[in-house]
Image: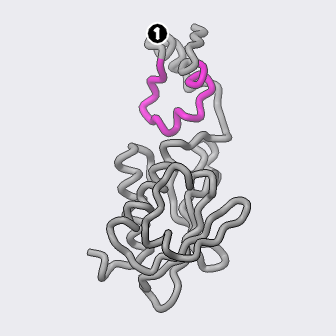
Amino acid sequence: MLENTSIVDIVKAINAEAVQSHNIPENFLCVVENKDGSESVWLKEPVTGKKSKMAFNYTVKGRKNARYISFTIKNKIIPFIEIPEEAEKKNIASDKDNTYFIFDSWNDSTLNFIRKVIFYFIENFEPSDKFGCCGKYKECSQEKKCLHDNKFYAKACWYRKKLEAGEIFF
């Protein structure tokens, strides 16, 4: 599978898998081409649709469909995700906010790492744009939990946070 597939296609396939497995609309997780030629995987705000948190940034190096890629990840998630042995052996640069890897081999552990990064961001995403309630406050109050069909969108509900804290208003 990997030998004839570009890195960009692999990342997009993992994104599609994440969208399906976490039951979120496709437009909330996207791959964006940056001005410098790199691409970033972003989560969008469920309410406004603006770009929110970046999962990671990557740039394919070398010839077209090359198997080596520079990879930038936010430092705050490094403690939560196991770094593949292939990356640990490389000279990994770091600054205040990011850690930079170069992967020159693509195998199951490397792809699993990218999958874990994307899934981590979806599972731990907290929207900055919030709304009061979707209108199901009586039903949610009665059940003592959020009942909205789209759990990703519901993360932006203030009342859901209150329910999770055990505060019932209605």
* Residue 5 visible in the current orientation: yes
* Towards the viewer: 63 or 44: 63
In the picture provided, is 156 more to the left or to the right than 146? right
Q: Is residue 17 above or below residue 110?
A: above
Of residues 117 and 151, the one nearer the viewer is 117
Q: In screen coordinates, is 11 left or right of 153?
A: left
Q: Quadrant of residue 109?
A: bottom left
Q: Secondary structure at mark 1?
A: helix
Q: Residue furthest front?
A: 89
Amino acid under disc 1: Gln
From where the camera sits, is residue 27 visible?
A: no
x 38%, y 61%: residue: 112
Check the image and report above or below for 20 versus 104.
above
| Residue 157 vertical position relative to residue 76 in the rendered view, above or below | above
Tell me, yes or no, whether the highlighted magenta stretch contains residue 159: yes
Tag 1 residue = 142
66 horizontally vs 90: left or right: left
What residue appears at the point 66 percent right and 76 percent down from the top-left corner?
35
| Residue 86 % position (x, y) | 43, 72
